[in-house]
Amino acid sequence: MTEKLSQLWTSLTKWLSERWATLTWGEIGLGVSLFLVSLAVSFGAIAVVMVKIPANYFSSHYQHDFLPDSPFLVRWGAVILKNIFGIFLILLGIVLSLPGVPGQGILTILLGLIMVDIPGKRPIEARIIKRPAVLAAINNLRARYGKPELVVD
């Protein structure tokens, strides 16, 4: 097993060194541009979600019903599409987290996690949000747009 890993590592480092030697300034500029654009989109998406969610979203008493006044088929169709999009964002975030791939993987994973309906996600989200620096930053952002502070149990 270690022999195969050693061979894989050797071939990977060889490929990377060959690729690095042929890298042009245009490719570097494209990579930096993609990184900056994905960073801005990730920050923007997280900011919109954090401003739009209800103040008690991270409370243990929060009961939400997605599109409560919509017909049954519309509501469930939207729930399914929301979950598919959330899974797509999580997978995209994993890819963006790989070394050498430009983008903000962790933020994209967090945004996808907020969108999907899976058991056990609330404690994970709450643990992230309860960090003093994170909660303060989100509450400052919400205050800037006239929204009440988040209620976290």
Image: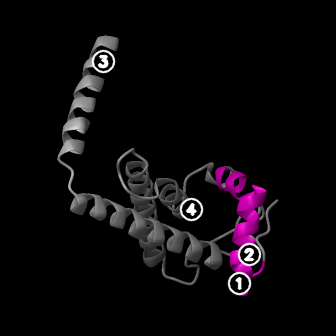
Contact between labelled residues 2 and 1, with CB atoms less than 8 Å apart: yes
Contact between labelled residues 3 and 4, with CB atoms less than 8 Å apart: no
User: In x, y percent, where is residue 65?
Assistant: 61, 72
Of the image marks 3 and 2, the number of the one nearer the N terminus: 3
Q: Which residue is mark 4?
A: 114
Q: Is residue 112 visible?
A: yes
Q: Which residue is mark 3?
A: 6
Q: Amino acid at mark 4?
A: Ile
Q: Secondary structure at mark 3?
A: helix
Contact between labelled residues 4 and 1, with CB atoms less than 8 Å apart: no
Q: Spatial distance from mark 1 to mark 4, Cα to Cα?
A: 22 Å
Q: Which residue is mark 2?
A: 140
43 versus 102 height, above or below: below
Q: Spatial distance from mark 1 to mark 3, Cα to Cα?
A: 53 Å
Q: Amino acid at mark 2?
A: Asn
The answer to whether residue 42 is left or right of residue 153 is left
Identify the residue shown where x is 74% and y is 73%: 139
- Range of residues picked out in magenta: 124-148
Q: Spatial distance from mark 4 to mark 2, Cα to Cα?
A: 20 Å
Q: Residues within 10 Å of mark 3 (few under 14, many from 20)?
A: few
Q: Tag count in the figure?
A: 4
Q: Which mark is residue 144?
A: 1
User: 55 and 1: which one is in front?
Assistant: 1
Of the image marks 1 and 3, the number of the one nearer the N terminus: 3
